Amino acid sequence: MNRHVLASDAVQHDVLSTLSEEDRYRRFDDLQSRMGEVWDAWNLNYDDESVVVVPSITLDRAVAASGTMTQAMEERFLFMLMLLRQPRLRMIYVTSLPIAAEIVEYYLALLPGVIPSHAKSRLTMVSLNDASPRSLSEKLLDRPRVMARIAAAIPNRARSHLMPYNTTELERDVALSLGIPMYAADPRLAVLGSKTGCRRLFAELGVPHPLGVEDLHSLDEVAAAIVTMRAQRPTMRSVIVKLNEGVSGAGNALVRLIDLPEPGAPGERDAVLDRLAQMELEDENTPYDVYVAKFAENGGIVEERIEGDELLSPSVQLRTLPNGEVELLSTHDQLLGGASGQKYLGCVFPASREYAVAITEQAAVIGRRLTQLGALGRFAVDFVVVRDGAGWTPYAIELNLRKGGTTHPFLTLQYLTDGRYDPATALFLTPTGREKHLVATDHLESELLRGLVPLDLFDIVARHGLHFDQSRQTGIVFHMISCLTEHGRVGMTAVGDSPEEAERRYHDAERVLLDEARASFEEAPLPG
């Protein structure tokens, strides 16, 4: 099988537009049937091996992100550049806007045992120069000439695959246009990753999850559902309304139920509707009317907000391989914030050993079912755990059939150390047996940081020794660097040999960065 034979697998833009959904999926299934061969050849050091990275955030958002923030989210995937450790691998990395050369060089300099210039020669960066809020995949499909250039840069389609952030029919069509399989979930399974779909899956599998009602499309339906739930659990103090396609908690809204009429009392439903009019949106930038319209358009759920004296929000990352194997990759404790503590801010890895085994057992049940349904690639299951006496009780709350906020910190650590997570011990160990821990955030934010540009950040890193130290395999890796100046925000992953060291490095880096940013204003000369 060679490049010329497989060239016919690519679907030209004018042909793709004439194909029905049925025909597109037939061709997509044919492409995906090759993923096993591509996977088996991975890491065999073929000189015509390649990967096409399209970090398209094709998700429903109530309020469109700015061009710079969209770029920063696409830039989170730059940890994939560490795959260039493979000495013959070629990578094509597509973004909406150009990524500054110094940011690319920063990542290439992290590669252990690789000459950065050699890795750079095998990297092709493709920018669409389009800052619009549309998804990257949609922009790419609108540019058949760019698509043709990407296809021409693939040395052999038999040893290439597409790596997206998440999958919809848009990413499917990108794969069809390039003639390469996609290492990600089939878009036809996307419903399982919706809030309604995952609740139904949890119920089918007997995985514990909060009391709730799914497949709702109006506030009247939500009110009726809450009335039913209160009849089942009269002591329930609050519920969470969730958009089916909400991400990172941004599609959630808190509804407080304290001091309502007793369950079944006259006027209960009207009182619930009044509370829904006062629900607290987690995304403070989303107008109430926009949120309600999104709920009516795409649907959602309402479920009990689990409460307890000690409550945590861990997650489990898994992946399904082309051969049907399910791998348990990692556990994380999520760091949440926002208006009601539901917005994803960052994570700690690994999750506490007190409940890691319990949540991995439940996640494995879900993973086996997804494999039976033909799922492929990485996914994560989010939990809430509440202390119950001497132990913890887990509740599954979400299934993310895509990469997520915990993907880039974990893979950064894995690619830099060659370590592995052991589910039995809930520890991450390097090949030499050393433990590694991390604390990561996407939300190191301050108005002071707007005074810095990426080169300033790198200067601070160099002068204060914040770089990742390959000899000790500890230190800091920054990400989302493109939004530093406009948004005063940057992401970082702090790695240490113990939880305490990782946390200390995190706070030290945060302090140094903010002190330097503050000093740059104090030391700036006045004009004239």
Image (spheres, rainbow, N blue to C red):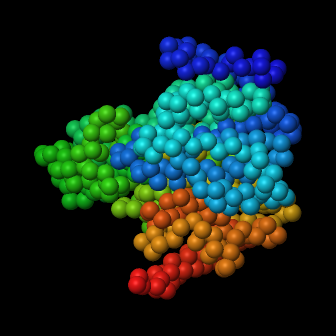
At a point 65% along the width and 45% down the height, the residue shown is 125
In the orientation shown, which residue stands out farthest toward the front? 528
The x, y position of residue 87, in whole percent, is 84, 47
The x, y position of residue 86, in whole percent, is 82, 47
At a point 50% along the width and 84% down the height, the residue shown is 519
Horizontal side of 232 relative to 388 (left or right) equals left
The x, y position of residue 55, in whole percent, is 58, 43
The quadrant of the rendering that contains the C terminus is: bottom left
Between 355 and 32, the residue placed more toward the observer is 32
The quadrant of the rendering that contains the N terminus is: top right
Q: Is residue 266 visible?
A: yes
Horizontal side of 486 relative to 261 (left or right) equals right
Horizontal side of 256 relative to 193 (left or right) equals left
The x, y position of residue 440, in whole percent, is 59, 63
At a point 81% along the width and 59% down the height, the residue shown is 112
Q: Is residue 495 above or below residue 407?
A: below
Between 477 and 383, the residue placed more toward the observer is 477
Q: Is residue 268 visible?
A: no
Between 198 and 304, the residue placed more toward the observer is 198
